[in-house]
Image: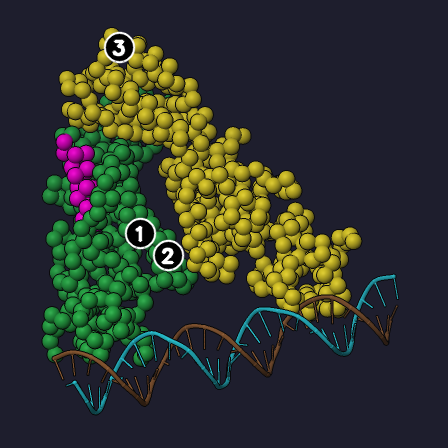
Chain colours: A green, B yellow, C cyan, D brown
DNA sequence: TATTAGCACTCAACGAGATAGAGTGCTAAC
DNA sequence: GTTAGCACTCTATCTCGTTGAGTGCTAATA
């Protein structure tokens, strides 16, 4: 039995309808409302074939058919029509994000909000990974007699700071000199290059002069560890999902929301390999459908992910989570749109200033 | 009809039972399982009285009784026994929070997590309001030839930063001088004292030397506005609520979660006046029960709030949200415990270092 | 006089049929 | 190859009786 054009057309129509209604689709409905030009009996035969081939499923004997994960897969890979964004979708999109210039975190956060609002699904973004970023400058800023801030700026413009206690007897002059020395030793190194060994090397190098400030070095090692480990995630629109009948059961809703609250799981999900069967569409977009996600919580959901870049370096992931029945073409279009915008904004933010 | 001791005892028992079971309580149950020493018929009469007086309600004619908001109010104000924390509740509590020293935001966040985990309800904390904080130091740190970071530290140890572009021709020397000038002009002022007038005064003072740096001043004004406006909230354990039968309806759950996501509403709720009928218990704790909250979303929930302090200045609010049927004595005890701990930690953090 | 036993009554919850209707699969005719 | 027709299946929905928890009232009791 082969998947001829007619079968494809019927499958396509069924999926489109099911995405809208979330109700099983019957042969009669297909024959009447979609213009295929065949009787319900013929459609019925074709639907039986499609079920046998694994593209459709029947919740129970006398119900209509719903798409299987395999059906969605085919739909995403070769059936669906790319979505044209409407004028109202487009207008204002630029401004919405750009208003919020200032810090990279805010941009990312804002992008998540915009995306979830546009799609009515849940958006998840990861902040840039820092591992490969070079240190631009290190500064020790005195606050008062007994404390100072350590400030670390990486090439990506990300900043980390931590308040440290100064040992008694360290005056401002002294702190300034120490700060200059640190800058000299650490600037230009990538975070990966700064190991414990490197820190103790620095310690040895300054032995005579700054013995007093050795504890501060430990703080610096800490903060660098922090930055290195840190991949934050921003989630927006989690409650959007509760509006879909797929999540009308509170226990499942709870499970889902708790999953979203667990940073590790979410990061793992976003970074999972794309399924082999998937044709990655243009723009590096990956779609994982239903059980293609290993996680049990996600068996009724699909995730669409994209990378975002500065220049040609991957900075992080953008993901949209929705029911398997989600509106793929429209969502993919919007994801592409937003990630492209993000690329542009980040590019301007980082590169143009150098 | 007056509320004699016997009626109080019966009401107390009924509320205790209902808090545990979430099921309407019948006269037979009270007579059998709680040791009041009366027959079910007598209890029945008393319960009818209590209903007439407004302390109990009947979901339908042949069901048991459940407490009304008025009933809970009486319970909280004068019936309930203060909760003794168990040893296992206490042990480790100190460490749990103290591990995370470093930044005030992290402490607050951690406190929310601990509180929601201890109580199994939802915890909400507000970060300190900055309005009255004095500026401790302002610093301009060069990053590269064309940009620098402005760093602002307040008396509370909160730090804000922003990257700014330097005008062409500004060398490091120049940045340092300017930085020193800013520090001199702004240190010690409260944020409220930095008005537009003050800013233009600074501008005038500098005009002769550094007329190129107007844009930097604008950025400072921006940052100050930012900080002034900012009262962040931290929420933890939102999904805990989904486990209670009161929220088994997804639509209500959604409403509740969306309310929690709306910063303004939550702040408003936390800062609402305490109800007149309420006797504020020791430690400045306020309880708002069911419809005592104006917000419609909260009509089935209660909020318990406390302030936290540094010295004698109120820094922010700690709140716990649960079903009206929540375990008041236990929750109040834990809230007191955590806010006292928070006070201590913040005290050490701020005062001891000065 | 306060308490209790007893009884009739009410009402939600539950389960057993009965019914309707949506949808299927199969067969025979076109 | 397509379609009309029909028997069949299964869920959803309704009704209806039953059960049991709980009440309110009355009369007996301490």
Magenta segment main secondary structure: helix
Q: In the image, what residue occupies the spot 11% across and 76% down?
A: A2
What residue is pinned by disc 3? B207
Residue A213 in percent (x, y) is at 29, 29
From this view, report whether residue A68 is shown above or below residue B215: below
* Kind of element beneath mark 1: loop
* Dot placed on the residue nearer the N-terminal end, 2 or 1: 1
Camera-nearest residue between B284 and A339:
A339
From this view, report whether residue B197 is shown above or below residue C29: above
Q: In the image, what residue occupies the spot 22% across and 79% down?
A: A41
Residue A216 visible to an observer of this rendering: yes
Q: Which residues are magenta?
A: A335-352
* Kind of element beneath mark 2: helix
When asked about the image quadrant of residue B219, the answer is top left
Mark 1 Cα-neighbour bin, 10 Å: few <14, some 14–19, many ≥20: some
Q: In the image, what residue occupies the spot 24% across and 7% down?
A: B208
Letter of the chain that mark 3 sits on in the rendering: B
When asked about the image quadrant of residue A341, the answer is top left
Q: CA distance from mark 3 to mark 1?
A: 51 Å
When asked about the image quadrant of residue A211, the answer is top left
Magenta residue check for A187: no
Q: Are marks 2 and 1 in contact (CB under 8 Å)?
A: yes
- Viewer-nearest of discs 3 and 2: 2
Residue A33 in percent (x, y) is at 25, 67
Q: CA distance from mark 3 to mark 2?
A: 58 Å
**Residue A243: which numbered mark, if any?**
2
**Residue A120: which numbered mark, if any?**
1
């Amino acid at each position: 039995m082969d998947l001829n054009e007619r079968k494809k057309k019927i499958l396509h129509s069924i999926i489109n309808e099911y995405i809208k209604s979330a109700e099983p689709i019957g042969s009669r409905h297909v024959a009447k409302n979609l213009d295929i030009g065949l009787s319900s009996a013929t459609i019925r035969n074709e639907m039986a074939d499609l079920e046998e081939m694994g593209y459709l499923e029947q919740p129970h004997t006398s119900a209509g058919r719903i798409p299987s994960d395999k059906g969605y897969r085919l739909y995403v890979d070769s059936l669906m029509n790319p979505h044209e964004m409407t004028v109202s979708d487009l207008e204002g999109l630029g401004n919405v994000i750009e208003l919020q210039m200032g810090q990279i975190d805010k941009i990312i956060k804002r992008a998540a909000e915009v995306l979830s609002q546009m799609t009515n699904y849940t958006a998840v973004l990861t902040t840039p990974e820092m591992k490969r970023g070079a240190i631009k400058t290190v500064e020790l800023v005195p606050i008062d007699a007994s404390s100072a801030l350590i400030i670390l700026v990486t090439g990506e413009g990300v900043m980390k700071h931590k308040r440290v206690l100064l040992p008694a007897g360290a005056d401002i002059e002294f702190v300034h000199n120490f700060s200059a020395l640190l800058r000299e030793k650490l600037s230009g190194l990538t975070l990966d290059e700064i190991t414990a060994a490197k820190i103790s090397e620095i310690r040895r190098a300054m032995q005579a002069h700054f013995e007093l400030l050795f504890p501060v070095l430990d703080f610096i090692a800490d903060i660098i560890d922090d930055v290195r480990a840190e991949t934050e995630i921003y989630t927006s629109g989690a409650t959007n999902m509760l509006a879909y009948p797929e999540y009308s059961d509170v226990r499942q809703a709870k499970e889902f929301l708790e999953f979203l609250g667990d940073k590790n799981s979410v990061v793992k999900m976003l970074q999972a390999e794309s399924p082999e069967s998937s044709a990655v569409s243009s723009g590096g977009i990956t779609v994982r459908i239903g059980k293609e996600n290993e996680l049990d919580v996600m068996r009724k959901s699909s995730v669409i992910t994209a990378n975002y870049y500065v220049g040609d370096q991957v900075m992080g992931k953008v993901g949209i989570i929705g029911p398997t029945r989600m509106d793929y073409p429209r969502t993919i279009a919007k994801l592409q749109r937003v990630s492209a915008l993000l690329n542009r904004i980040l590019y301007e933010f980082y590169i143009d200033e150098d």
